[in-house]
Amino acid sequence: MTKNLGAERPAGHVTILEAARTAGVTVGTIRWWVRKGRLPAAAVLETEQTIWIKKADLSKAIKGRKMTHRPHWRDLSALSPNEAGEVLNVTGEAVKQWIYQGLLKATKLPNGYWRIKHDDLKAFLETRQNLSVALYIAGSEPTVSRISSIAPDFGCKVTAFGSHGAALMAMEDIPAKALIVDTGTFGDGLGLIRKIRKTTRYGSPRILLLSPAPPSERETEAMVRLGVGGCLVSPITDAVLRAEVKALVANAGR
């Protein structure tokens, strides 16, 4: 269900996107104002959904700023993927992936750069919760660190668990769409997957297994029955891991 962003608006605040439009600058400039102290740090309120700017402090920053030369070629009504990423709390690469998938409307300029109109980004913000994927990882270091460094590029929020019980409790609270199980460090990974598949209260996640050795014929048959999407055998290169995580996330949204 899409959240009503307006109902969650803190009193006396505007989104960072609205702040940029009010000031007639880019989102990156608002961020720069905060770093340089033109906007006090206390004026910024970050939530999981968006970034809010206190109206009163924004007004003071606008009144106090000196007039500076702004390049005439920059359309302030549109954002670059990196600036849109600042609004969405993801990387510019994640924004580009949403553009390529047709989820976020954008215009490609003759020079090859992408620009996203403010209104199109606002519309995307209102539906983003349905597009975001909570990626659960059942494993331990260094696997968690490797995947955690990749997943944000695809707009994922990563949560890792070190036990069956912790994983199942989290999935019961927020049903999983994507799950990676490292059988080398997590133990009975197939046992966890059997529990998940027995009921719908944990969701119906797309699943990727990481294994220290090739699975036996019996294990392979079990994976097929349990709907496991794939199994990567160590050693796993960064390129392969990145490609498989990308595919897992893309399929999880379907």
Image: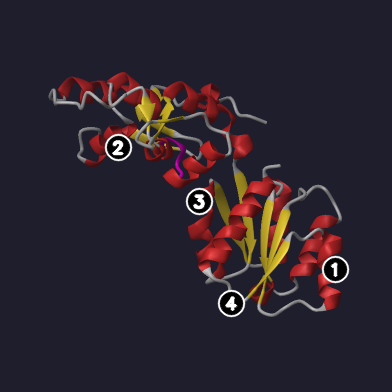
For disc 1, the neighbor class at 10 Å (few under 14, some 14 to 19, many from 20) is: some
Residue 15 visible in the shown view: no
Q: Which residue is painted at 46% across and 21% down in the image?
A: 119
Task: Pinpoint residue 253: horizontal percent, then vertical percent.
Answer: 67, 43
Three-letter code for the amino acid on which mark 2 is drawn = Arg
Q: Secondary structure at mark 2?
A: helix
**Residue 90 is inside the magenta segment:** yes
CB under 8 Å between discs 3 and 2:
no
Question: Which callout, 3 or 2, points at the residue further toward the start of the chain?
Answer: 2
| Main SS class of the magenta portion in the image | loop
Q: Which residue is mark 3?
A: 152
Q: Is residue 41 left or right of residue 237?
A: left
Q: Is residue 223 left or right of residue 234?
A: right
Q: Secondary structure at mark 4?
A: loop
**Residue 231 is inside the magenta segment:** no
Task: Pinpoint residue 24: horizontal percent, then vertical percent.
Answer: 28, 21
Closer to the eye: label 4 or 1: 4
CB under 8 Å between discs 4 and 3:
no
CB under 8 Å between discs 4 and 1:
no
Mark 3 and mark 2: Cα distance apart in space: 20 Å
Q: Which residue is mark 1?
A: 222
Question: From the image, which quarter does the C terminus lie in?
Answer: top right
How many numbered badges does the structure rendering display? Answer: 4
Closer to the eye: label 3 or 2: 3
Mark 4 and mark 1: Cα distance apart in space: 23 Å
> Which circle marks residue 235 in the picture?
4
Three-letter code for the amino acid on which mark 3 is drawn = Pro
Q: Which residue is mark 2?
A: 31
Three-letter code for the amino acid on which mark 1 is drawn = Ala
Q: Which residues are magenta?
A: 87-91
